[in-house]
Image (spheres, grey):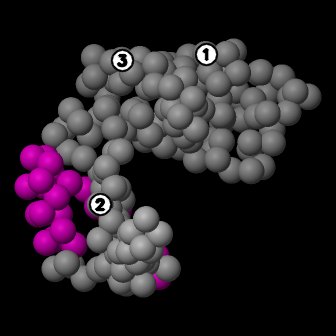
Amino acid sequence: MAELITVARPYAQAVYSLATEQQRLDAWSEALGWLAAMVSNPDVADVVTNPKHTAQEVEALMLGVLGERASEDVKRFVGTLIENHRLTLLPFITEQFELLKAEAEGAIDATVESAFPLTDEQAAELTGMLSKKYGKSVRLDVHVAPELIGGVRVLIGDDVIDASVRGKLHTMAASLKN
């Protein structure tokens, strides 16, 4: 997966530069989100990766679903990805684009896995603690993961903060082996 991100990053940086220059970050964000969702769909992925379908057919499918979200620049971008056989990288390109956008906005995204649903107060407290730690505003994406037993696991970029019961049990088990 690291290789895919490495290949996707220059595309994301190019699109981000263009979107910033045009002051169309939100429009590009929406278009990329739609494109990434499309190629993540197994039925669309089958069409996109099937050599029986021409580049024109694939492009017509992608742009047809996008509709008015497909500016001339988006159309050219899709064409470039098809030409370079990189259309399946769209989820990674979108992820990298969103990271660049969030960084410019002074925000970071945090994926939170919690053993139980977080209350609004708990989410606000966690957001405050993370904002203080990272010096940026934090956007939480919370998922319930009962296998954690209790507590939370937070992923921000490459950082992992594991304050779950499961994580603590694994740490204790590892220390007993040593």
Residue 80: assigned label: 1
| In the image, residue 125 lies in the stretch drawn in magenta | yes
In the figure, 22 relative to 107: above or below? above
Query: At which x and y percent is residue 31?
Result: 48, 37
- Tell me where residue 145 appears, x and y as whole percent: 46, 76
Per the image, the residue denoted by label 2 is: 161
**Marks 2, 1: nearer the viewer:** 2
Q: Residue furthest right?
A: 52
Q: Is residue 15 left or right of residue 74?
A: left
For marks 2 and 1, the one nearer the N-term is 1
Nearest to N terminus: mark 3 or mark 2? 3
Amino acid at pointer 3: Leu
Residue drawn 62% across the image and 21% down it:
81
Mark 3 vs mark 2, foreground winner is: 2
- Residue 18 numbered tag: 3
User: What residue do we see at 36% from left, 80% from top?
Assistant: 165
* Amino acid type of the residue that numbered disc 2 sits on in the rendered structure: Ile
As drawn, 57 above or below 158: above
Instruction: Magenta stretch: give its range.
Output: 123-146
Q: Is residue 108 above or below residue 160?
A: above
CA distance separating discs 2 and 1: 39 Å
**Could one spot residue 167 in this view of the protein?**
no
Is 84 within the magenta? no
